[in-house]
Amino acid sequence: MMDTYSLFRQIADSWVLLAMFLFFIGVVVWAFRPGSRKIHDDTANIPFRHEDKPADDRETGSSDQEEKRQ
């Protein structure tokens, strides 16, 4: 009879490795799927959105300043 460690080691060496590889391939396919370019470009340009002046509270979605004013 195989001890527990050896059984788990065999499972990890074969099926878990296969599952992790398939997950990785799925993430790569999802990242490069058609139609995702707009989302990636928008995310990549976040640091450059407000180069000229700071963002307004309305643009950032911050409600802290609004609560202080009331």
Image (cartoon, rainbow, N blue to C red):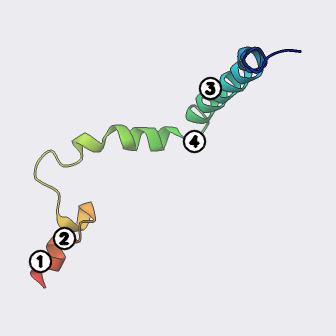
Q: Give the foreground label among 4 and 1.
A: 1
Location of residue 10 with respect to 41 vertically, above or below: above
Q: The disc labelled 2 sits on which kind of residue? A: Asp
Nearest the viewer among 23 and 57 is 23
In front: mark 3 or mark 4? 3
What's the amino acid at mark 1? Lys
Q: Is residue 68 left or right of residue 43?
A: left
Image location of residue 24, percent across then percent down? 62, 26
Q: Position of 31 compared to 61: left or right?
A: right
Given residues 29 and 70, the one toward you in this image is: 70
In the structure shown, which secondary structural element does the residue marked by tag 2 occupy? helix
Image point (72%, 14%), residue name: 13
The residue wearing badge 2 is 64
Q: CA distance from mark 3 to mark 4?
A: 20 Å
At label 3, which amino acid type do we have? Phe
Q: Percent from the top left, x then y, of residue 18?
A: 73, 20
Q: Earlier in the sequence, mark 2 or mark 3?
A: 3
Label 4–label 1 contact, CB within 8 A: no
User: In this rendering, would 35 be left or right of 3?
Assistant: left
- State yes or no: discs 3 and 4 in contact (Cβ < 8 Å): no
Q: Using the image as rendered, state which of residue 51 and residue 57 is in the foreground.
A: 57
Whether label 2 touches label 1, CB < 8 Å: yes
- Quadrant location of residue 64? bottom left
Q: Quadrant of the C terminus?
A: bottom left
Q: Could you tell which of marks 1 and 3 lies nearer the N-terminus?
A: 3
